Image: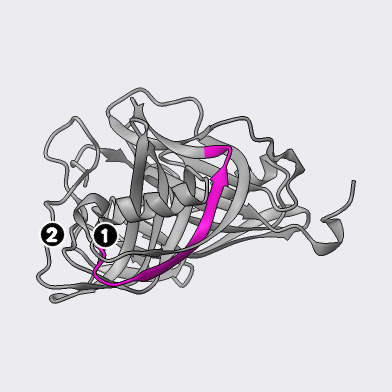
Amino acid sequence: MLTAKAFERSTLRTIIHPGPVAAQRLSAVAGVPVALKFTLEPGDAVDDALAKGFSNAGCEGGFVMLDHGRFDPFRYVMPALSSDASHAAWYSATFEPAGSVLMRKACAIIGRRDGRPFIHCHGIWDTSEGRRMGHMLAPDTRVAEPVEVTGIGLKGATFDSLDDPETNFRLFEPVRVGNGDPSFLESPILLARVRPNKDISLAIEEICSTHGIEAADVYGIGSLNEVRFADGRHVGSLATEVLIHEGRVEGNSGQPKARLDIAVVDVEGEIYEGQLTRGDNPVCVTFELVIRAIIPEGARHKG
């Protein structure tokens, strides 16, 4: 996904995008959480099926997990080299595996683009050619059997696809919608975005600190500039696509500390999984997060 001149080394690996660097590197918006559980119906395109489930719950944004089910046809892309200087990153050609595809695990972030529902989904799936990982093309992928999904929707907040001059992409940005007031929530929830060159773990900790969150579950997808795992392994690809398998923030001496177990695919299609090294995994293009605060039982009804 990168041209040869699209990065330069520093203490933390840095990717240079074509546009002006935005001053604000983190953004987060609170909303009212709604627990989701619904079924994707056979024959529906994945984006339509997910949009129906969110609409029925009265939500515009959030996420769902897909950890089973068959899809046919199935279309996806992977990270690939950029062909020109207009972007520091791009996508591969579309892959169209023959026959049905079995979903192993995916995270779909739901928001809107041009006023309509829009889906951004990274996952792992089994095809006729073997196990693959990438970015599912939700409008071009259809549900082949009933698939039950779970997740969290939000009222009062969503992701909106907005022009991003720095990267020259349209990217999800958390925004407020409606007049909902999340201040009363027993378990507040945030939609968040991290921009390039911020370490993803430290960014999550900073977001939590800013919003007074000491412990949280973290869900999300995005891209990293190379990957360093806690066990010493590393992925040399200058751009990747990432799915958070399990994300957790826990208090450490009064400060939130993030632990992220992820799956990642590189530009060669190789899949890696493991716990990220904290402080050595900068975002490549963007990272979209859903952060659900965990409130201690004794504190739920105080005040």
Q: Residue 215: image x %, image y %? A: 69, 57
Distance from label 1 to label 2 (Cα)?
10 Å
Q: Residue 160: image x %, image y %? A: 42, 35
Q: Which residues are magenta?
A: 143-157
Q: Is residue 90 left or right of residue 14?
A: left
Does the segment drawn in magenta span residue 43?
no
Q: Secondary structure at mark 1?
A: strand
Q: Residue 53: image x %, image y %? A: 43, 54
Query: In the depicted view, which residue is nearer to us: 41 or 236?
Result: 41
Does the segment drawn in magenta span residue 152?
yes
**Residue at point 51%, 45% (across, down):** 59
Mark 1 and mark 2 in contact? Answer it, CB < 8 Å: yes
When the figure is inspected, residue 165 is found, relative to residue 78, above or below; the finding is above
Amino acid carrying mark 1 in the image: Gly
Disc with the residue nearer the chain's start (1 vs 2): 2
Q: Is residue 3 left or right of residue 49?
A: left
Q: Which mark is residue 95?
A: 2
Q: Quadrant of residue 75?
A: bottom left
Pointer 1 residue: 134
Query: In the depicted view, which residue is nearer to us: 147 or 247?
Result: 147
Q: How is the image coloured?
A: one colour
Amino acid carrying mark 2 in the image: Phe
Q: Residue 246: image x %, image y %? A: 51, 66
Q: Main secondary structure of the magenta part?
A: strand
Q: Residues within 10 Å of mark 1 (few under 14, many from 20)?
A: many
